[in-house]
Each structure stands twice: as structure tokens, then as C-alpha cells.
Image (tube, helix red, strand yellow):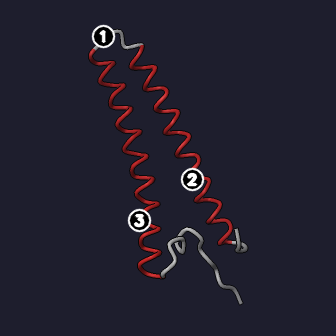
Amino acid sequence: TSGKGLALLIGNGLRLFFVVAGMLAFLNFVIAGFQYMMAGGDAKAIQSAWDRIWYSLLGLILMVGSFALAVLFGYLIMGDPFFMLRPQVYTP
């Protein structure tokens, strides 16, 4: 990654955010799967597990959508798809 100071911090922060969000979504899917398996036919427990699955999926879609919008706006505005994902801070 090229850059110094604040730009490097922001870029690393974005990467960390996406990795942690992905890991949490995966963990949430696993927990929801166990909830579904352990429901034992209880309609309320099954619904709770499905809700957790849908919320995890919605979170992943929002995360990927925000990434895609950042790439799209970077390309449309600046001509560089990763402009917004690799911020540059100009210093004197």
C-alpha cells in the first residue's frame, strides 16, 4: 500500500473493518445454523434462527454494496475505481 500517515491508517482501517465484518457474519451464520438444528420443531426457535440468518445476509449485502458504491463513485468521479478506497492525503 502506498501512502503515509492518515491515508495509510484509513486504508488499513477499511481493510480491518471488512475482514472483521466478514468474520462476524460467518460466525453469525454458524450460530444460526446450530440454533436451527437445535430447534427441535419449535416454531419460535426456527423463526429466530431464520431471522438471524437473514440479518447476517442483509449485513453482508450492505457491506458489499457499500464497497461496490465506493468503487463506482470513485470510477465515475475520479476515473480510478479504487480512489475512495485508497485515500491520499497531500501534505506540504
| Quarter that holds the C terminus | bottom right
The residue identified by callout 3 is 69
In this rendering, which labeled residue sits more in front, label 2 or label 3?
Answer: 3
Q: Residue furthest bottom?
A: 92
- Label 2: element kind: helix
Q: Nearer the viewer, residue 69 or 89?
A: 69
Q: Earlier in the sequence, mark 2 or mark 3?
A: 2
- Label 1: element kind: loop
Q: Earlier in the sequence, mark 2 or mark 1?
A: 2
- Relative to 17, is 42 above or below? above
Q: Picture quarter containing residue 47?
A: top left
> Residue at image x 37%, y 39%?
55
Q: Residues within 10 Å of mark 2 (few under 14, many from 20)?
A: few
Q: Earlier in the sequence, mark 1 or mark 3?
A: 1
- Relative to 90, is 14 above or below? above
- Relative to 17, is 80 above or below? below
The residue identified by callout 2 is 17
> Residue at image x 41%, y 15%?
37
Q: Residue furthest top?
A: 40
Name the spot of residue 70 as percent of width and height, x first: 46, 67
Q: Picture quarter containing residue 5?
A: bottom right
In the rendering, which numbered label is found on residue 41? 1
Picture mark count: 3
Q: Do the residues bearing badges 2 and 3 touch, measured as CB atoms within 8 Å?
A: no
